[in-house]
Structures are given as structure tokens and as C-alpha cells.
Image (cartoon, coloured by chain):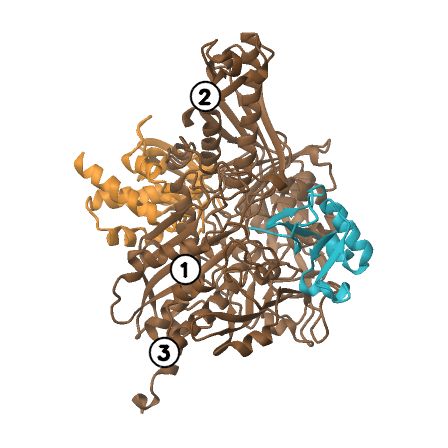
């Protein structure tokens, strides 16, 4: 199981939980499982999210492997200058 | 409105063109003569990207009418290097990394050359005030000032 | 690759870290380099855009008949010529380029013409009759959030926004951890302040410009100044409802962007005019159009509350950020809310952000978008706490600094970061100990940016004469051709002058993300190194064939293939040039390429020190001395790393002291020119000293970190903190223009003096 940290304003859709455990080995699996478990997250996931794994930020990368002990943080999609 | 026939000298070459009465010298240089080295950053004389000299005097070519060029001598960035040999200012700008995007660079070089012709040994403050009408948004001016001071020193030695 | 990041950053570099002359230097000092407005085409028309004079108005009708009939006019277009795309982001971009049912801000495009001359095009614009129903408008963020505010567009609110706001509030975000109220209870002193910052503009000297051609069989070519030709192709092909392959976008040299050229404003208009007229069409924005109708930053309104113990430990931090990003939804406040407290290792932190729509142009990215204002507010309150408690501002920041293992307020745990090293370098620097005169003050601030990687595609060809051509797809905005070429030369073991780097059109490579997020030297560099490695592997294979040994028994060293293992010393090494010379005979051309969605960019921290003097008579602030400390991971070309640090610092100085969007009661922009929108000029400034630190980024083979953006972040608070110490007044509104400082000084002066 992977623990995924959810940012504050999304917790209204996760029954207030700041951390959700899902069975996932890649970022795509992780996002799919999150949306399956908490359909209220779908609009934000479809708008776009970045995922930080062990401190590194990944954008739109489905098959980035996630280890069970990885730190996984959901982040809004990053935009730059 | 009928067009005006203008005969003038650009970088030592005699040229002529037809222009509208309200056309700027900058537009004539760029669109009639194909000299696109002078840039339009504002069109109101605030940014200096279009700097050229008119009879040796530094002007914003966006504030000069093309018709005013009749019988005058214009120098633009395209005339600064002599053949393959870059002017010392041009060399120093590359050496000191005094440009990033480079769009203000032609105007700054023309303006600086005009300064060094009047004042071969300017202080840093004099350079900064002389170039206060030439905006650069990339460099923070630091490396530009260093390049100018170094080029001035080299020109004094020459 | 993600889980076994390796770094060879301790290696000895031969090319990386040196300062060769940039390859595009001569073109740019002689006026030969071609920028957006510099290209012409035979039969070319001049395109001009009619813009709304109203900040908010329903468009009842547009009558273009007189303009169409005018002499020399070849095409007139309005929104009726476009079809709204299904995709919401694309729809917003199109509606920003050409108003549909409503004009949403002063300067919003409503129609366009293409004519045979500038004069004919201008005359035609005057013949277009737009029937407007003027609507109430709002340009201030706080006003726009009030429940009774005029609504820009209904139905844009995200599900996360709570009750009590107008429909202009499109999104809400929240980050943080720990119990902040318990943290504030533990504090010896708590300060809460409210701040406002005005919108600023990237202020690139080159206005947006493009030249479009469209053939009757549906193929199009576009030349434009942009931070990303592939983005332009993606957006414009979607808007024009054409296949991406039918549109070729060639990037011109770019005269500055800083984020403002990561979207489109005029390109779809030029394409539609070219399609309708059957002729090439060039559009060049005027400076006033750039300021009114391209993409300035968000303006902001913020509340920050921080608690500190007597010995300088921050016990809790709370920030509420309200940004407006113009007439469309905008996610920049999320970046601000994530970045606000990034420099601190905190047990309890909470940031909240709201975005509101207003009758202003759609904001675009500007160097570390969203971060400068949020960090300005936080760093101002930290500094005021230091003043109140009598603590050294660098010591306090060192005591609370985020470091490897710190859980950031936005959730991630940092790996190796350079903040403490920057703070220590600032503390030890002679600048920090230099004496100050009367009326002078010194300020300090930290800065942060995330940095990105993203889609990147590089091809590296080994030419038969032993030279190397690198083909990349990111416009060179500040010397990146040099840094990319240097990394290719380093990896191949050849001199820098044997490598030429070209930035190419959209037909020549796969998708490359825009030049943004400080990504180019990191991500394009990474792809270039990998492409060079692929070419080296191929050259080793060719040498093995020539020698008749196994390819595995050949290694690449110092620009040569060498036999190794059991064959070591059996054959003299073959240079790159020797292998390239016989490439045809050994199987054909030699190339390496690499395509990646690059990750591992590595966050960036910096610390700025500034001395200022405030004139009590005029309220004018003079910057006396400035030093930038920033972690570059590995500085590939130190001149251009310094250039990024200096340029960003000066843009931040402008944001702090003089730059602002000024909207009148009528909702119109009052200072749409460089005379009144005043960017820093040479005589405003001292030299900008730089100290580059190199804490290798484990996500890059050479340890490189992006350096482009962080430097704009610290100046806002550094200068506010210096002004506070110089003049005894703390400004909570930006810019700190002379009238604002004077008003604060007057308010602080004893009343008796006037009586």
C-alpha cells in the first residue's frame, strides 16, 4: 500500500482524510485508485495534478514506479515562467 | 497623401526611398531599406531599442520622421563593424556576456558608441546616466556597464 | 530511472563551468539576428487589431461592412470567424485572443483587419462599428470577491470554493500541516499583517510579433517570437481546427519573455487573417497593446500571521492569499500558497489561496509565477518579528531554514537543498558586515522556486568532418545555446567550438515544452547528455567493427574510442573525427537522440542582501548595494548563471519600487507605456554582485539545477525590510513608490511639527 498525501482543499472529497492508502505501483494506478475510492477528486485530477515522489515532482507521467515506502504527495499542476 | 522622396546616407552609403509624410525613420530603415537591426520596443522614445545617430547625434529613430533624414547622415548598428572586424564595443559585449536576449543590444551599442565619441573616459555613473534611456530587461545592466567600461579602456589604449 | 537517481557531480569538468563566447553573440551585436518583427514575405499584409475601450461590455453587434469595402483591405475578422474549441483551456485562450459575447477588459481584442499597408489597416479599424452595452466592472481583487461584485463569467467556480463569495472566485486551495493555533500559543510574539501588491508586467523589450501564411490546401506556416513553438502549434492548430502536422511554427530569436511568451495573443488572429485573405499577414503589437492586452502578473491581497519565540524559533505560520489573474480562471495562487513558507522548517503551517476573476487581461506566467508576492508577505513578517525581538535576521532564518529532510508546507520532504549554504554565505560575506550611513538600511530575504523538467526531445548528429550538430526545440532566451552545446562537448570529450546548437521549428523534432520553469539547462541539458551518450555508444560499436572486437570491449574516454579489457592497448584510440570520417563505410551517419518527460528538476533557493537609502524629503529609495546568493547545483556557464541572478534581482527591484498596473475608476489602464510603467533603468542601480553556490542536484547527471526564476522572488521583501530599517516605516503595499513612502513617513512624523 502507498500512502498519498492530499492537499487541504481536496480533503472535502476524501472524508476529511489528509492521507489515503491505495494499492498502486505506478502514478497512473495511484491516480485511478484515488478517483475510484473518492469520485469527488475526479474534477481536480482531470484538471491536472503533479505528483511528488520522494521529493521529486512528476507531471503527467503514468508509469513512474512508486515503492510502498515512497513519500507520495499530490500537488496542483505546476505552471512556470 | 502623396509620398515623399528622400535621399540620405546610411552607414556611408547613399540611399533613397519613398515614404509617407507621417512615417518614422525607424519604419523607413526597417521596412524600406531592410535594416532590421534597429528595433521597435515602444514607439514612444522610452526604450532606446531604435537608437541611431543622425549627423552624429544620438536619437530614437521612432521619434524622427523619415522625411527629416533628407540630406543627413545616419549611422545604425549595421554599420558598426567594419567588414569582418567587430567594433571593440561589440567584442566586449560578447566577452562580458552583456546580452541575454539581445533585442536591446543594437540600441545600447549605438548609444554607447556615441557616448565614447563624446567622452572617451566616462565614470560608471556617467555611463549609467547616458544609458538611462536604453532599457534592458534581461541583464540588470551589470554586465553591460562592465563591458562598456572595459571597451572604453581598450579604445583609450588604441 | 526515477528511483535510482545517480549523480556524477563530483566529476572533474573540462567544458562545463568555463565561460566560452556564446555562439549567437555576433549575430546579436551586429543586428543580424532576426526577431519576431524582422521577417517579411512577398505580398505580405499588415494585420491590426481593434480593441475594446471598455473594461466590461456586452457586444451586441459588430458591423464590419464599411471596413471590408475600404481601399486596400483584404480581410476583416471577428469572433464569428472562429469556432469555440471543446477544451476549456483552449477556449479561454481563444476568447482572450478575440472577444466573443463580451469584452472582458480594457484592450480586449474584438475585431482585426489585414490590409496592404499600415495606413490602410489603421483607417479600416476606424470603420468597424461595435455596438457595446457597457456593464459594471471590477478590477480590484478584494472587491471582485465580494458577493455583490459584477460577475465576469458565471459557471467557472470549482467545487472547492466555499460560501460567501461572488461567482468570480473560481478556486480555493489549502496546504500545510500541524496545529497552528497550538503553535501560536507557544510563541512569545505573534505578528499579523495585511499586504497588497499590484500587477506587474514582464516588460520584455520585444513586443509580440508574428508572420502567418496559409495555403488553400490547409497548410500553414507561422514565424513568431515565443517561448515555445510546440505550444504555439498545439494551441493554434486546436483553435484553427487543423491537424498539428499541417502547421509549422518557426521560432524567431526572442527579445525577452520571462513567462509572458508561454501563451498566444495574436497568432490565431494572424492565421485567420492569412487564411481569409490568402496572403501572408504580419501582426506586431504596440507597446500599449502589450501592456493592456498581453499577460501581466496577478495582483494580490494577503494576510500573514507568524509566531516566534524569544530566541527566534518560528512556532507557526499562516497565510491567506487572494490573487486575481484577470478575466479567466487562473491557478497561480496555488503556486503562491505552496511557495509561501517553503524556506522554513515548520511544525505548524497553513496556507490558503483564493483566485478571483476581474476585468483585467488574462495573467500569464512571470518568472516564478505566484511566489514573489507570497514570499514578500511572509519574509516581511519574519523580518518585523526579528526587529521586535531584537534578533539578527540571518540568524533567525538559519535557525528555521528548510533543509534535507524538512517536510515543506506543500507536503514534500526536501532532499539536498542549498538554503542553509546560501544563508551562511550571506552571513560570512563582507556585504553583511559593511557599515551603513545615516538614512540607510539593510534588508535580507529568502526566495524559492520549484523548477520543472517536462517533455524534451534532442537530436545530436555527428558530422563527417568531426563536428557535432545539436538540434533542440527550446528558444534561447538567455544563452542556452551555449550551455546546451557545452554539455554536449563535455559528454563527448570534444572542444566546445566543435559543437553547434540549433533551435529548430516544429517539423524538425518531437514535442518540447515551452522554455519555462527554469527547465531548459536542466531538461534539455539532460536530454543532450543522454543523446551524446547514445552517439558515443554507436561510435564505440563502429570502432569495435573496425578493430574486429566486441563492442562491449570498447570504452569512450577523452573524445576517443579505446579498446579495453582483454583488448586494452591492442589498437590506438580512434577520435570522434576519425570515426566520423568513415561513418559511411561503417554503416551510415552517426546520431544520438533522446526523448523524455524529464523529472528530478530539484528545487531552488536563494538569499538576497540589499542596502538602500530613503530620501525623507521625496520618499525616493536608492538601492546602494545588492548581493545575490543562489544555489545553481552546477553552473554550466557561470556568466549566464550570474546573468539570470542579476536580471531577476533587478526585475524584483522594479516590482518592489516602481512597477505597477494603475487602473482608473473607469476600469481603463492608465499607464500603458514605458514612460509611466517604469522599469528599472541603468542609473537606478548599483552593480548586482553574485555568489553562486553549487549544491549538486541529484536528479541531473552533472548536478544542474534551474536558475532562472528564484532570483525575482527575494527582492520584494529584501527591499521592504531595508526600507523599514532605513526609514522606520514598514510598507505593506507594493510598489513602494515615493508617494507611498512619503505618506508613510508623514504619518509617522510627530504632528506637532506641522502646527
Q: Secondary structure at mark 1?
A: helix
Q: Residue C653 got which mark?
A: 1
Chain given the colour cyan:
A
Residue under numbered circle 3: C745
Residue under numbered circle 2: C559
Q: Secondary structure at mark 2?
A: loop
Image height of C14 relative to C689, above or below: above
Which comes sooner in the sequence, label 2 or label 1? 2
- Chain at numbered mark 3: C
The CA distance from mark 3 to mark 1 is 21 Å
Question: What hue does chain C carry in this figure?
Answer: brown
The CA distance from mark 2 to mark 3 is 65 Å
**Image point (47%, 58%), residue name:** C447
Coordinates of residue C452 in the picture (x, y in percent): 57, 47
Image height of C566 relative to C304, above or below: above
**Image point (52%, 10%), residue name:** C582
Which comes sooner in the sequence, label 3 or label 1? 1
Other-residue count near label 1 (Cα within 10 Å), few / some / many at <14 / 14–19 / ≥20: many
Q: Camera-side residue: B76 or C515?
A: C515
Q: Secondary structure at mark 3?
A: helix
Quadrant the C terminus of chain B occupies: top left
Q: Camera-side residue: C744 or C112?
A: C744
A57 sits left or right of C748 in the view: right
Amino acid at each position: 500500500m502507498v500512502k498519498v498525501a492530499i492537499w487541504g482543499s481536496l480533503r472535502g472529497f476524501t472524508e476529511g482524510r489528509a492521507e489515503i492508502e491505495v494499492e498502486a505501483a505506478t502514478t497512473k494506478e495511484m491516480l485511478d485508485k484515488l478517483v475510484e475510492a473518492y469520485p469527488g477528486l475526479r474534477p481536480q485530477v482531470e484538471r491536472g495534478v503533479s505528483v511528488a515522489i520522494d521529493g521529486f515532482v512528476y507531471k503527467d507521467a503514468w508509469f513512474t514506479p512508486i515503492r510502498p515506502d515512497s513519500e507520495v504527495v499530490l500537488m496542483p499542476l505546476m505552471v512556470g515562467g | 497623401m502623396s509620398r515623399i522622396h528622400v535621399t540620405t546616407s546610411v552607414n556611408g552609403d547613399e540611399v533613397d526611398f519613398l515614404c509617407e509624410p507621417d512615417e518614422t525613420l525607424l519604419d523607413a530603415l526597417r521596412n524600406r531599406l531592410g535594416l532590421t537591426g534597429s528595433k521597435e520596443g515602444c514607439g514612444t522614445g522610452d526604450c532606446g531599442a531604435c537608437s541611431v545617430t543622425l549627423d552624429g547625434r544620438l536619437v530614437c529613430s521612432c521619434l524622427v520622421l523619415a522625411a527629416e533624414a533628407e540630406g543627413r547622415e545616419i549611422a545604425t548598428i549595421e554599420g558598426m563593424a567594419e567588414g569582418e572586424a567587430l567594433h571593440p564595443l561589440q567584442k566586449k559585449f560578447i566577452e562580458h556576456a552583456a546580452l541575454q536576449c539581445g533585442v536591446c543590444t543594437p540600441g545600447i551599442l549605438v548609444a554607447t558608441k556615441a557616448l565614447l565619441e563624446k567622452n572617451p573616459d566616462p565614470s560608471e555613473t556617467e555611463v549609467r546616466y547616458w544609458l538611462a534611456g536604453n532599457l534592458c530587461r534581461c541583464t540588470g545592466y551589470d554586465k553591460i556597464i562592465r563591458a562598456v567600461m572595459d571597451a572604453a579602456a581598450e579604445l583609450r589604449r588604441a | 530511472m526515477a528511483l535510482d537517481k545517480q549523480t556524477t557531480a563530483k566529476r572533474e569538468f573540462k567544458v562545463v563551468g568555463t565561460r566560452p563566447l556564446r555562439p549567437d553573440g555576433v549575430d546579436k551585436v551586429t543586428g543580424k539576428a532576426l526577431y519576431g518583427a524582422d521577417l517579411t514575405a512577398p505580398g505580405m499584409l499588415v494585420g491590426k487589431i481593434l480593441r475594446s475601450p471598455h473594461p466590461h461590455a456586452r457586444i451586441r453587434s459588430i458591423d464590419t461592412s464599411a471596413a471590408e469595402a475600404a481601399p486596400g483591405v483584404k480581410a476583416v475578422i471577428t469572433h464569428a470567424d472562429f469556432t469555440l474549441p471543446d477544451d476549456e483551456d483552449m477556449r479561454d485562450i481563444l476568447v482572450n485572443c478575440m472577444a466573443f459575447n463580451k469584452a472582458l477588459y480594457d484592450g480586449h481584442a474584438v475585431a482585426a483587419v489585414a490590409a496592404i499597408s499600415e495606413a490602410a489597416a489603421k483607417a479600416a479599424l476606424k470603420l468597424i462599428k461595435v455596438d457595446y452595452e457597457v456593464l459594471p466592472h471590477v478590477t480590484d481583487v478584494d472587491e471582485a470577491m465580494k458577493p455583490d461584485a459584477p460577475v465576469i463569467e458565471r459557471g467557472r467556480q470549482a467545487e472547492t470554493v466555499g460560501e460567501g463569495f461572488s461567482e468570480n472566485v473560481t478556486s480555493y486551495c489549502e496546504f500545510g500541516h500541524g496545529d497552528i493555533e497550538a503553535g501560536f500559543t507557544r510563541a512569545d510574539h505573534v505578528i499579523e499583517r495585511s499586504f497588497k501588491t499590484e500587477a506587474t508586467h514582464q516588460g520584455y523589450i520585444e513586443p509580440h510579433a508574428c508572420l502567418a501564411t496559409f495555403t488553400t490546401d490547409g497548410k500553414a506556416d507561422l514565424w513568431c517570437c515565443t517561448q515555445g513553438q510546440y505550444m504555439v502549434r498545439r494551441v493554434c492548430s486546436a483553435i484553427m481546427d487543423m491537424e498539428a502536422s499541417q502547421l509549422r511554427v518557426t521560432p524567431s530569436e526572442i527579445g525577452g519573455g520571462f513567462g509572458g511568451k508561454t501563451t498566444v495573443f495574436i497568432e490565431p488572429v494572424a492565421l485567420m487573417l492569412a487564411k481569409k485573405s490568402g496572403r501572408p499577414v504580419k501582426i506586431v503589437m504596440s507597446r500599449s497593446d502589450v501592456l493592456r492586452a498581453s499577460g501581466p502578473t496577478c495582483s494580490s491581497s494577503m494576510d500573514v500571521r507568524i509566531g516566534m519565540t524569544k530566541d527566534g524559533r518560528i512556532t507557526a505560520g499562516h497565510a491567506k492569499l487572494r490573487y486575481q489573474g484577470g478575466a479567466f480562471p487562473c491557478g497561480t495562487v496555488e503556486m503562491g500558497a505552496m511557495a509561501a513558507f517553503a524556506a522554513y522548517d515548520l511544525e505548524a503551517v497553513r496556507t490558503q489561496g483564493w483566485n478571483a476573476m476581474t476585468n483585467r487581461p488574462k495573467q500569464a506566467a512571470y518568472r516564478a509565477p505566484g511566489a514573489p508576492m507570497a514570499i514578500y508577505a511572509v519574509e516581511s513578517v519574519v523580518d518585523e518579528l526579528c526587529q521586535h525581538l531584537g534578533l539578527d535576521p540571518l540568524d533567525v532564518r538559519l535557525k528555521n531554514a528548510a533543509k534535507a529532510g524538512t517536510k515543506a508546507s506543500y507536503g514534500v520532504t526536501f532532499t539536498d537543498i542549498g538554503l542553509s549554504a546560501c544563508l551562511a554565505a550571506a552571513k560570512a560575506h563582507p556585504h553583511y558586515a559593511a557599515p551603513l550611513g545615516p538614512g540607510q538600511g539593510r534588508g535580507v530575504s529568502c526566495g524559492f522556486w520549484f523548477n520543472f523538467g517536462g517533455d524534451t526531445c534532442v537530436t545530436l548528429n555527428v558530422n563527417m568532418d568531426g563536428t557535432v550538430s545539436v538540434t533542440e526545440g527550446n528558444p534561447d532566451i538567455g544563452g542556452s545555446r551555449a550551455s546546451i552545446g557545452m554539455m554536449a562537448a563535455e559528454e563527448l570529450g570534444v572542444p566546445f567550438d566543435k559543437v553547434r546548437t540549433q533551435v529548430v521549428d516544429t517539423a524538425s523534432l518531437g514535442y518540447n515544452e515551452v522554455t519555462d520553469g527554469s527547465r531548459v539547462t536542466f531538461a534539455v541539458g539532460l536530454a543532450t547528455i543522454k543523446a551524446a551518450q547514445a552517439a558515443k555508444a554507436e561510435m564505440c560499436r563502429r570502432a569495435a567493427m573496425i578493430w574486429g572486437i566486441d563492442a562491449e570491449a570498447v570504452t569512450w574516454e577523452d573524445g576517443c574510442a579505446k579498446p579495453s579489457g582483454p583488448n586494452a592497448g591492442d589498437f590506438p584510440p580512434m577520435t570522434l573525427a576519425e570515426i566520423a570520417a568513415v561513418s559511411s563505410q561503417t554503416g551510415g551517419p552517426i546520431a544520438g537522440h533522446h526523448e523524455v518527460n524529464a523529472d528530478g528538476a530539484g528545487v531552488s533557493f536563494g538569499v538576497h542582501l540589499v542596502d538602500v537609502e530613503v530620501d525623507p524629503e521625496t520618499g525616493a529609495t536608492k538601492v546602494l548595494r545588492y548581493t545575490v546568493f543562489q544555489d545553481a547545483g552546477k553552473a554550466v556557464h557561470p556568466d549566464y548563471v550570474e546573468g539570470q541572478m542579476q536580471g531577476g534581482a533587478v526585475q524584483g527591484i522594479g516590482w518592489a519600487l516602481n512597477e505597477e498596473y494603475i487602473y482608473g475608476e473607469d476600469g481603463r489602464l492608465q499607464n500603458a507605456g514605458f514612460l509611466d510603467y517604469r522599469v528599472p533603468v541603468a542609473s537606478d542601480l548599483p552593480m548586482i554582485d553574485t555568489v553562486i553556490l553549487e549544491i549538486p542536484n541529484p536528479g541531473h547527471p552533472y548536478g544542474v539545477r534551474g536558475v532562472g526564476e528564484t532570483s525575482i522572488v527575494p527582492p520584494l521583501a529584501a527591499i521592504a525590510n531595508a526600507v523599514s530599517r532605513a526609514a522606520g516605516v514598514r510598507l505593506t503595499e507594493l510598489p513602494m513608490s515615493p508617494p507611498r513612502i512619503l505618506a508613510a513617513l508623514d504619518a509617522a512624523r510627530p504632528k506637532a511639527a506641522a502646527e
